[in-house]
Image: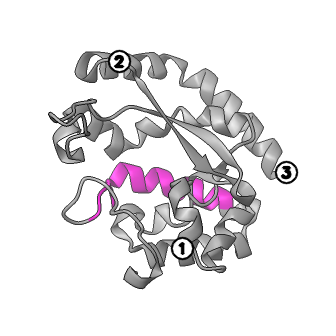
Amino acid sequence: MKRIFDLLASAIGLLLFGPLFLIIAAGCLLCQGRPVLFSQERPGVAGKIFRLWKFRTMREDKNAAGEDIPDADRLTRWGLFLRATTLDELPQLWNVLSGEMSLVGPRPLLVEYLPLYTLEQGRRHEVRPGLTGWAQVQGRNALTWEEKFKLDVWYVDHRSLWLDLKILLLTVITVLSCQGINQKGSHSMEKFTGNEKI
């Protein structure tokens, strides 16, 4: 039932949001230049790697050494708006349609985190990663890594269609209230460096 729901909802979402995709893409092009999409490899169910898609929220500015300048300096006002409303995540509806993601599940994190998880934390990969998840409606980036992982594993143990519907409703409320967009003092979540620091 969950996969059927994901297929129907993502297909309908891609059709309904088609005009919005064009508007967002135009905004990215005007404010940040090309490309309008950002892609990155992320681990999915059972740690299988897939390519995740987002609308780009930063300029590709680099310093004299050819390295990216800090995120806060590359993040545009348009990018801040997309992040606050989570509109930058809309292209992941394609990831849901193709079966790499689900509408609801633990958020897909960086591949480099895989060897850093404890066995319990690694259980988040027992299900497909989600466009939104239990941790997202409990605080998003305001949570610590330890809190996020506990919530992810709780979802794995208690997942159901009814819980997914509840999370989707809470996601709308969370986005509209602009709760937990950023970690305190940062425009993005601090990187996970291992359990000795959480």
Among numbered discs 3 and 1, the one appearing first in the sequence: 3
* Mark carried by residue 34: 2
Confirm whether the magenta stretch covers residue 175.
yes
Q: Which residue is mark 1?
A: 149
* Mark carried by residue 65: none
Q: Which residue is mark 3?
A: 1
Q: Amino acid at mark 2?
A: Arg
Measuring 71% from the left and 34% from the top, which residue is drawn there?
Answer: 97
Query: Gap in Å between the C-alphas at discs 3 and 1?
Result: 25 Å
Measuring 54% from the left and 73% from the top, which residue is drawn there?
Answer: 149
Q: Which residues are magenta?
A: 164-183
- Between 169 and 68, the one nearer to me in the picture: 68
Measuring 23% from the left and 39% from the top, which residue is drawn there?
Answer: 75
Q: Amino acid at mark 1?
A: Phe
In which quadrant of the rendered view does residue 47 lie?
bottom right
Confirm whether the magenta stretch covers residue 170.
yes
Query: Gap in Å between the C-alphas at discs 1 and 2?
Result: 35 Å
Residue 126 pos. (x, y %): 74, 65
Among numbered discs 3 and 2, the one appearing first in the sequence: 3
| Secondary structure mostly taken by the magenta-highlighted segment of the chain | helix
Name the element at disc 3.
Answer: loop
Sort mark 1 into few (<14), some (14-19) or many (20+) by Cα contacts within 10 Å: many
Residue 111 pos. (x, y %): 55, 54
Can residue 109 be seen? Answer: no
Measuring 32% from the left and 53% from the top, which residue is drawn there?
Answer: 178
